[in-house]
Image (cartoon, rainbow, N blue to C red):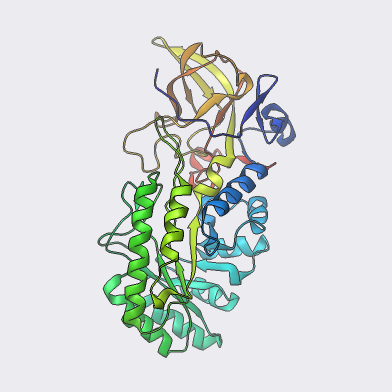
Amino acid sequence: MKPLGPIPSGYTAIDGVLAIAGRKATELVAEAGVTPLFVYSRDLLTARVAALRAAMPERLSIHYAVKANPYGPLLKHMLGLVDGFDIASGGELSIVRAAGVDPARVSFAGPGKRDAELEAAIAAGATLNLESEGEASRALAIAERVGVRPRLAIRVNPDFDLKGSGMKMGGGAKPFGIDAERVPALARKLLAAGADWQGFHIFAGSQALSADAIIETQGQTLALAARLAEETGVPLPKCNLGGGFGIPYFPGDEPVDIGAVGEALAERFADLPEVLRDTAFCIELGRYLVGEAGVYLATVVDRKESHGEIYLVTDGGLHHQLAASGNFGTVVRRNYPSAIATRFDAPVEEEASIVGCLCTPLDRLADKGGFPWADVGDIVAIFCAGAYGASASPAMFLGQGPAAEMLV
């Protein structure tokens, strides 16, 4: 049998059935009237943000990276928990505004922003994290045309990355941000043009579980921010330190020690250079805030055996859970946390693979894992489904369509 990833804390069994926010998975499926179904827990979202705030310095603001999960009810819940929202498209700007987010709390990063997106963000009063000199020129021209003083920051491409990160966003040639050595000249240009200068956005990597690596990167980020601010010639108003906090997906993964990260950051905040003394700092986190608060539920529609191997065929699949299938940047496929929701506290009885309904061998949600005996009508649960699930998967592949979603 191949090991399964660790099931996050906060999930229990009621009468042998997986409970999410104190309600049986079967009850939630009945309420939704359909599977596949993503279920997100308000309680787990609230607890995660509270624990993070307790660990981090009070001076540090917490932003939510909307790309992790843009589900409307979830965004409305996050409104009361976080200090800001980070978006990566004009579409996400529309989504957060529909959820009631004040655009003044929004920052917009991402390469390839179209003129219409730049204009919408400038007119709304969101902060643009500029990714190139060309984008900066377009933003200034648009702002002059529409008669709005634009809120502009520079996304810096640092000359370092986040060690051990699942996705490196710095450290060499990148489509993201402006190479560090070119930043001061552009910042001075923005200031001379009369822009509302919002500082730097420095994001070196994501999905890191090592506190030591995160601590080292935050130290490098602060040092870089100070150097660039000195070269720009003005104190730095704001600095987005990026994110990078990962969650355990796979066997052997351990959670980030946020206490150690917060303690180290507090020590650095206590000894900042003059140019950063009054800087407002934030971190932006997506999967760390919402990933473990979500579960993907699918129903077994067939149980079959082939050459001695058991397959539990579900009505779900990679079209909703691309990452769990191993097809979202994973080099070696490993099993996400998964279980038979309707037999959640039952012992392991067999080796089985949980697969989806698509006619491709890539559609595998759990490979030769140990599970209780399950049959048609049972419900399977894939955990760590709160981030990069519904919105990061090809829902229309083979005409299957999106899964239902629910916040409880």
Report x, y in % for residue 118.
Answer: 49, 74
Which quarter of the figure is the N terminus placed in?
top left
| Picture quadrant of residue 241 | bottom left
Q: Nearer the viewer, residue 150 or 113?
A: 150
Report x, y in % for residue 63.
Answer: 54, 60
- Quick check: 273 above or below 398? below
Task: Residue 84: tell me if it is visible.
Answer: yes
Numbered marks: total:
0
Q: Give me the residue at 56% from left, 46% from top.
A: 290
Q: Nearer the viewer, residue 160 or 102?
A: 160
- Quick check: 87 above or below 298? below
Apparent side of residue 360 relative to residue 163 in the rendered image (left or right)? right
Apparent side of residue 392 relative to residue 17 in the rendered image (left or right)? left
- Quick check: 89 above or below 314? below
Which quarter of the figure is the C terminus placed in?
top right
Report x, y in % for residue 289.
Answer: 54, 49
Apparent side of residue 193 relative to residue 346 in the rendered image (left or right)? left
Task: Residue 242: tell me if it is visible.
Answer: no
Report x, y in % for residue 214.
Answer: 38, 52
Apparent side of residue 327 relative to residue 37 in the rendered image (left or right)? left
- Quick check: 139 above or below 249? below
Q: Give me the residue at 67% from left, 56% from top.
A: 76
Q: Nearer the viewer, residue 6 or 52?
A: 52
